[in-house]
Amino acid sequence: MASELQEAICMAKQERHKNLFLNYRNLNNFPVELLKDEGLQFLQRLYMKRNSLTTLPDNLAQKLPNLIELLQSLDLSDNALQFICPEIGRLRSLRHLRLANNQLKYLPPEIGALCDLETLDVSRNVLVRLPERLHQCLSLQCLTADRNNLTSFPRQLCQLHSLNELSMAANQLTSLPLDLGRSRELQFVFVDNNVHLKGLPSYLYNKVIGCSGCGLPGQVSDRVPQPLSLSLGDVSLPLPAEVKAIGSETERVGPLEELAMRALHKRSLLPPFLLPRSLLDLLQCPLGHCHRCSQPMFTIIYPKLFPLRETALAGVHRRTTVSFVAYCCSSQCVQTFDLQQ
Ligand SMILES: [Zn+2]
């Protein structure tokens, strides 16, 4: 087997292959032959699917400098990776990265440096969260994170303006960020089998969604404590952790902190005085934008629930009890919001 491997790598070097297939090779370690001499100078796609790799060499980019310029596709699915080194961020030509079915608990934030990345598949791992810096991957079109342990989706990732398909089925999601679906580009959102998830932002009403197995009756969402939840009849719906207050339809004036944040945001300059880090982060990336008028919101929301079973989509989605939630900036906006618009 070892000599077969050496032969394959040697031939790829000599014949200047653009693709190298090292799938199903029973590899426990990254082959040193790949890192020797000048490496593979023409390689664009490296497939190492279904092996037993537990780690990647830290000096990957250093040893294979040509990978930085040329490597577009890296498939490490079906291995035993527990950790991805930050060096991955140096593979700046990478467009497709497949890490499905490993044992990853975290992704390095440096993955955000992959500006050309179009596809990221991290499904079937044990991820507890996605890095916020992923929002810098502005070319990302397809993000697949099915079957992990995600409890939330960073609101910063709603800024991925090229993202067309997002799949997070079979996780532990309890809520979704307010702006998810605001981008016109995002057309496919699959969150099936997140049993604690009961609310979908109203932006998703006109998209292709998968939500079967969500919000099933009898499923208590106290596994992950949420600071606030919304109630309507028998529905109680956890809100994203950043929401500090819920406004009512009869309130005319918002809280002072909210008004101050909106005023500062309009000036679009960082304030001349110091703000706590959490408030600065909020100024740069608001909690969400009013589903009626697009005004940015920072601390308080005025929500309106539309149970899916009472909408025109009732016949399309079965085995789900989710509601669409319109998050608005004021009592006026919430009163005039209509799901059909
Ligand atoms: Zn509004």
Image (spheres, rainbow, N blue to C red):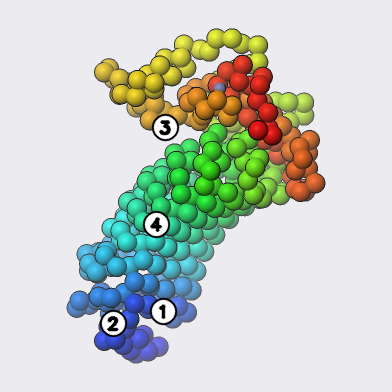
Of labels 1 and 3, earlier in sequence is 1
Provide the residue designation for mark 1.
21
Image point 39% across, 67% down: which residue? 73
Determine if residue 77 is in view: yes
Callout 1, which amino acid? Phe
Which image quadrant is residue 272 in? Answer: top left
User: Are the residues at dot 4 and dot 2 in contact (C-beta closer than 8 Å)?
Assistant: no
Provide the residue designation for mark 3.
285
Callout 4, which amino acid? Leu
Q: Would you say 141 lies left or right of 203 here? A: left
Callout 3, which amino acid? Cys
- For the residue pair 15 and 112, the one nearer the viewer reads as 15
Question: Residue 332 location in percent, x, y?
Answer: 61, 16
Question: Which tag is nearer the camera, tag 1 or tag 3?
Answer: 3
Q: Residue 117 carries which label?
A: 4
Of labels 2 and 3, earlier in sequence is 2
Task: Give the CA distance from mark 4 to mark 3.
Answer: 22 Å
Q: How crowded is mark 4: few (under 14 residues within 10 Å), some or many (20 or more)?
A: many
